[in-house]
Image: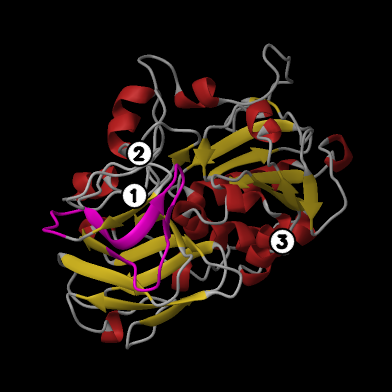
Amino acid sequence: MQTLALLALGACALALGLAAGACAAASPRRSFAAVAMLIGLGAGVPAAAQNAPGVPGASVAPVASGAPPVEGVAPGFTGATGWLNTPPLSLPGLRGKVVVVSFWTYSCINCLRTLPHVRAWARRYAGQGLVVVGVHTPEFAFEKDPANVTRAIKDLKLSYPIALDDGYQVWRAWRNRFWPAIYIVDAQGRVRHHQFGEDGAAQTEQVIQALLREAKAPMPAGTVATDLGGIGMPADLDNLRSPESYLGYAQASAMASPEALARDQPRRYSVGRLGMNEWALSGVWTVGPEFAQARDADGAIALKFHARDAHLVMAGPPDGARFVLTLDGQPPGDEHGLDVDAQGNGRVDASRLYQLVRQRGTVRDRRIEIRFLDPGVRAYAFTFG
């Protein structure tokens, strides 16, 4: 089932393809990564050439034989709406440094599984002249709030510079289409490597080392040690058979409540029979383009899935909201996620991704129900790992 697992690795697509474990912005609907990889890159066109950022037609100096190729001139960060952890930066001001540019958004599970590598590179190679710049380009409206991003980078222990790209100007300048996406810029301001999606961290680190050596930096032996536990644990591809699923009507495709979805107005829903990868609402909800919002206490969401991990992106009312989760009708016990205890109790205390389930034994088909004890919760998207 390896191929099916790749298909379900939290990916979304535009008309063209993307790498496994990557999301493309402004997609009309979620699609499958492996299919997009097969059909999207274009016959006879190298992926690096088609997706390369930089100034069209810009001349670049040749590189040594066997060195990472030049993909273009790095565009920089003009258009950033703000900066965290640093005063504003520019690529001309970083000339002489090797720069990792990491496009991400904080509620994206694919990004969260990549961040341990990015964070470790920033720490290990800073003394050798590496600068990491995160470009936070939001998917959901709540990710445009600087206070939310500030809280997220504190929780995620990100100390490197973060550019806020609420208007997508940096994203467009780099011709980027994916979360997560990593570009490596050499000491002369040229893009020499890109990584789309979760795979490829080892190769990316090799390029970082090569470009630091090219810049005459002393290089420590070996590669970085990365903590891949917690939310950053790589997806269990052999058991991943559930794709990302949105609850807002703009992209929802798997709702199974018997009642027809009412756009932007309260309606009472119920849970009937669920097929694999279907979800249903119970109680009074208002479904908007990005999220479904519980209008009363005791609203619930049920889901049937097959994956080691199940997550839900949620936002709560100002005072937070309590919820109780059941797994196949019982408290989750040892298979609770990071944001739920063994009895199934949890609290929506911020606008972010919540890990609901992490199966520790044999991964099998499961059914969860999240019942909210307080009104006002907004539920955005299920993701899996």
In terms of secondary structure, where does tag 1 sit? Answer: loop
Q: What segment carries the magenta color?
A: 272-301
What residue is shown with label 2? 30
What residue is shown with label 1? 244
Amino acid at circle 3: Ala
Residue 2 image offset from top left, x and y in percent: 21, 49
Given this view, does label 3 or label 1 mark the residue nearer the observer? Answer: 3
Dot 3 surroundings within 10 Å: few (below 14), some, or many (20 or more)? few
Amino acid at circle 2: Arg
In terms of secondary structure, where does tag 3 sit? Answer: helix
Quarter holding the C terminus is bottom left
For the residues labelled 3 and 1, say whether their Cβ atoms are less than 8 Å apart.
Answer: no
Pointer 3 or 1: first along the chain: 3
What residue is shown with label 3? 147
For the residues labelled 1 and 2, say whether their Cβ atoms are less than 8 Å apart.
Answer: yes
Can residue 292 be seen from the camera position used here?
yes
Judge left or right: residue 131 versus residue 261. Answer: right
For the point 53% across and 32% down, the residue is 177
In terms of secondary structure, where does tag 2 sit? Answer: loop
Amino acid at circle 1: Glu
Residue 289 image offset from top left, x and y in percent: 45, 42
Dot 2 surroundings within 10 Å: few (below 14), some, or many (20 or more)? many
- With respect to residue 48, does 8 lie above or below? below
Snapshot quadrant of residue 356: bottom left
Q: CA distance from mark 3 to mark 1?
A: 26 Å
- Is 295 in the magenta? yes
Q: CA distance from mark 2 to mark 3?
A: 28 Å
Can residue 216 be seen from the camera position used here?
no
Pointer 2 or 3: first along the chain: 2
The type of colouring in the image is secondary structure
Question: Closer to the camera, 85 or 96?
Answer: 85
